[in-house]
Amino acid sequence: MRTLKQLDVNVTNRCNLQCVHCGFESEDKTELSLEEYEILLSDAKTLGAEKLDITGGEPLLRRDLPNIVMAGSSRGYYVKLITNGTLLTRDYLAQLRENGLDGIAVSLDGSTPERHARIRKTKEDQFYRTVESIRSAKRLGLKTKVNTVVFASTLDNLPDITQLCIETGADAHRVCYFSKVKRGLHSREEPADPYELERVMKSMKRYVSSIDLSFGSPIYGGGCFEDTDMLQILPDGSVYPCSVLAAYGTALGNVHERTLTDIWNDETLWQGYQRCSQGCPAKKIRVEDLC
């Protein structure tokens, strides 16, 4: 019997950037209310959920974000925020920390303003705001991770990005594999060769004593959700087994129509679900474990 451990909630589709790889691009402005999240989080807690990732879109565009953080922390969740970092200030971070935020993951896709801005489709000066957000989070005692989406054109930049992560004081650096879904279908960027990515990551073992370094690749592991311990919930209430399937799969159900407990416990939904046939690009591969 599955036990739910983690809930990932996309609290909005709105975003202040136009990143070339976005897998959650949507014109749908529908969002669950704070009250609906409170019900949802209570429901998930009865199923055993311990971790809450708040993501988007850009979650900072929700004015009630501090309340959503508090809704999670007050129910005993370990609460993490996933953000592009451009809208954060130290004072706002401090407020989120006060409301119970435990960790943060900030997106950084280049070691220089030019390289970061090319992927994030933003002004080059936003690079410095993003880097400062990472430093501010660390100073406030938040568990701090940096997420980097890698492309064929940016493989060579990975060592420099990791070095920058170390300089900011980040605890972890996760290199995410680019899958061509949603906006990525129209991008000129191409996925990195997974075997070349593995070679580059192996060459970066020298960094593992300074930072928790990991990456995702489709050449590792098979379909994984038969024993999944997480759920992904989109702003319209749709429920998926994970973020990858949320980008192109069919929803298990919707919390507007059924409770999360009903969806989680309905074996007919899971048995009929289309499983991933290849390796999972979201599967975490720790660099220190590579041979």
Image (cartoon, rainbow, N blue to C red):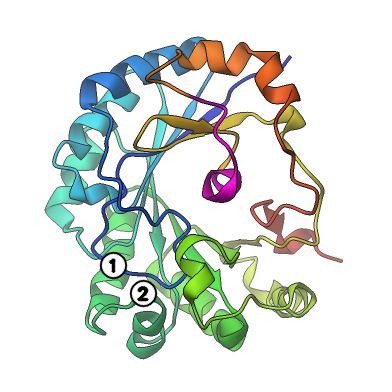
Q: Quadrant of the C terminus?
A: bottom right
Residue 257 drawn at (x, y percent): 42, 16
Q: Is 98 rendered above or below residue 124? A: above
Q: Residues within 10 Å of mark 2 (few under 14, many from 20)?
A: many
Q: Which residue is pictured at 73% across the width and 26% down the height?
A: 272
Task: Tell me if 41 is positioned left or right of 123 in this view.
Answer: right
Viewer-nearest residue: 65 or 239: 239
Q: Secondary structure at mark 1?
A: loop
Q: Magenta stretch: residue 252 in it? A: yes
Are discs 2 and 1 less than 8 Å apart at CB? yes
Check residue 17 in the rendering and tell me which mark sits there, or answer none: 1
Identified by mark 2, the residue type is Arg
Check residue 197 in the rendering and tell me which mark sits there, or answer none: none
Q: Is 119 rendered above or below residue 215? A: below
Q: Which residue is pictured at 25% across the width and 40% down the height?
A: 97
Viewer-nearest residue: 53 or 118: 118
Q: Magenta stretch: residue 119 in it? A: no
Residue 126 drawn at (x, y percent): 24, 76
Residue 200 drawn at (x, y percent): 71, 80
Q: Which residue is mark 2?
A: 120
Q: Is residue 241 visible?
A: yes
Specify which label sits upstream in the sequence, 2 or 1. Answer: 1
Residue that sits furthest to the right in the current view: 291
Q: Is 175 rendered above or below residue 286? A: below
Q: Which residues are magenta?
A: 243-253
Identified by mark 1, the residue type is Leu
